[in-house]
Image (cartoon, rainbow, N blue to C red):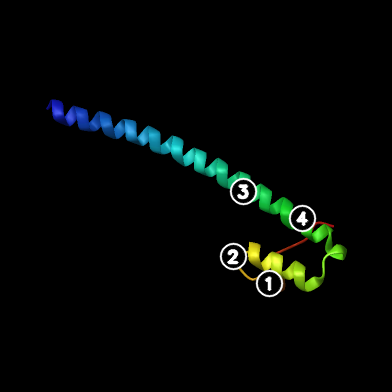
Amino acid sequence: MEALNDIANDLRVLSVANENHHQRLLETLQSIDALVSRMIDSLVRNDGSLEKSKRLDILNWMATQPYVNHHRQGVFKCAA
């Protein structure tokens, strides 16, 4: 019976540690997402200073979906 209590206690400790780890991962992902959003905003604002092909290369490199396809679908909306 003591072994079962030890196992149950270990599982509770692991569960709490897992929740903490999960929360830190979420915070890190939110931080990365904010950084990428700022980078994209900066690229869009500096449209005139980069050649179109160079800008598309950078956006395609950063995106999981090719920028042009994403733009054509109307998902990517620039703030005016």
Check disc 4 and give the amino acid type: Asp
Amino acid type, label 2: Thr
- Of all residues, the one furthest to the right in this rendering is 48
**Which residue type does callout 3 highlight?**
Ile
Distance (Cα) linking label 3 and label 4: 14 Å
Measured in 3D between alpha carbons, the distance from the residue under mark 3 to the one under mark 1, in whole angstroms, is 24 Å
Front residue of this view, candidates 51 and 17: 51
Q: Is residue 4 visible?
A: yes
Residue ID for mark 1 = 73
Report the residue marked by disc 3: 32
Q: Which quarter of the rendered picture does the C terminus lie within?
A: bottom right
Crowd tier of the residue under label 1, counting other residues whose Cα lies within 10 Å: few below 14, some 14–19, many 20 or above: few
Circle 2 residue? 64
Residues tagged 3 and 1 counted as in contact (Cβ below 8 A): no
The residue at which mark 4 appears reads as 41
Q: Amino acid at mark 1?
A: Gln
Residue 30's spot in the image, x, y percent?
A: 60, 45
* Spatial separation of the CA atoms under disc 2 and disc 4: 17 Å
Q: Label 2, label 1: how many angstroms apart (C-alpha)?
A: 15 Å
- Residue 37 rendering spot, x and y as whole percentages: 70, 53
C-alpha span from label 3 to label 2: 14 Å
